[in-house]
Image (cartoon, rainbow, N blue to C red):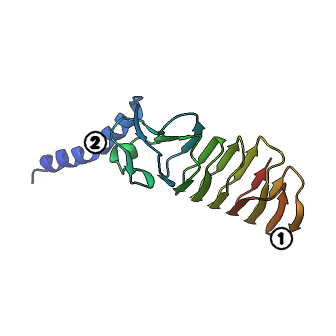
Amino acid sequence: MNHKPFIRRFGLVFMLPVMLFLSACGSDEATEESRHASIEDVNTVHIDHGSTPLQLEVADIDSLEASLVLPRGGDGLVLDESPNSVDIRLKSNISQLLNLGKKPRLRILIPSHFEGKVVVQGSSGSVTGTGLRSHSLDIQGKSGNIKLQFAELNNDLNVSVHSGNVHVQLDDSKPNASWRLQSTSGRRSIAFPLDKQSEQKRRTEGITGGGSVEVNIETRSGNITVE
């Protein structure tokens, strides 16, 4: 029996994934894909970043800007507009999966005058926010660290993650906020005194200033830090 055709076919099947892997590891090319959306009459901006790290920023701009950096290029960003909402999500792309250790990066710029709601959903990607103000923020995730820096805490904040640390940094040490910090297993710390403070095994509650803004932060396993 002639085994050579079989050996050649086996060799091709074996070599194909090896060639794809080497090609992915050896390529340093990256492209940035951008989208813009008007926020006039928009009440809600919804962002589904999956397992991709998300950078959320507030800037003095007229329209919302979304940009996605892909390690090997391609079309991966979806932005849908309706009269009252903007939805941002990522496509599933096999070329991204081949870039081991080189995940895409998603950056969203929110106009500073937007006073609606920003809803963020993800699976295992981290979320970083800088210069936040004006809009309310709702973050839901399974795993991944959350780090938020507020220029001004003047609207509601809700964060809920299964596992991951939550770090909130405020430029104002006396915000008008009502606080509820809850962790099933993890430390909770807040850098300033709370009025009407209530401390339980898994929950810390209290008020700063007038308490007009609602802040709810919850993690099942992870530390919560407010400073």
Count of numbered circles in the view: 2
Q: Secondary structure at mark 2?
A: helix
In this picture, residue 151 sits left or right of residue 63: right
Q: Residue at x 22, y 44 (%)?
A: 12
Q: Secondary structure at mark 1?
A: loop
Q: Residue at x 54, y 50 (%)?
A: 125
Residue 136 placement (x, y as % from top left):
62, 54
Residue highlighted by disc 2: 15
Q: Nearer the viewer, residue 169 or 8?
A: 169
Label 1 CA crowd tier, 10 Å (few <14, some 14–19, many 20+): few
Compared to residue 22, the image places residue 49 above or below, namely below
Residue 3 placement (x, y as % from top left):
14, 50
Indicate the quadrant where residue 77 lies.
Answer: top left
Label 2 CA crowd tier, 10 Å (few <14, some 14–19, many 20+): few
Q: Residue at x 34, y 47 (%)?
A: 94
In this picture, residue 67 sits left or right of residue 215: left
The numbered mark at residue 201 is: 1
User: Can residue 37 be seen?
Assistant: yes
In which quadrant of the rendered image does the N terminus lie? bottom left
**Type of amino acid under label 1:** Lys
Q: Which dot, 1 or 2, sits closer to the camera?
A: 1
Residue 214 placement (x, y as % from top left):
72, 60
**Type of amino acid under label 2:** Met
In this picture, residue 49 sits left or right of residue 201: left
Q: Nearer the viewer, residue 57 or 5?
A: 57
Q: Residue at the far left: name it.
A: 1
The numbered mark at residue 141 is: none
Asked if labels 2 and 1 touch by Cβ distance under 8 angstroms, the answer is no
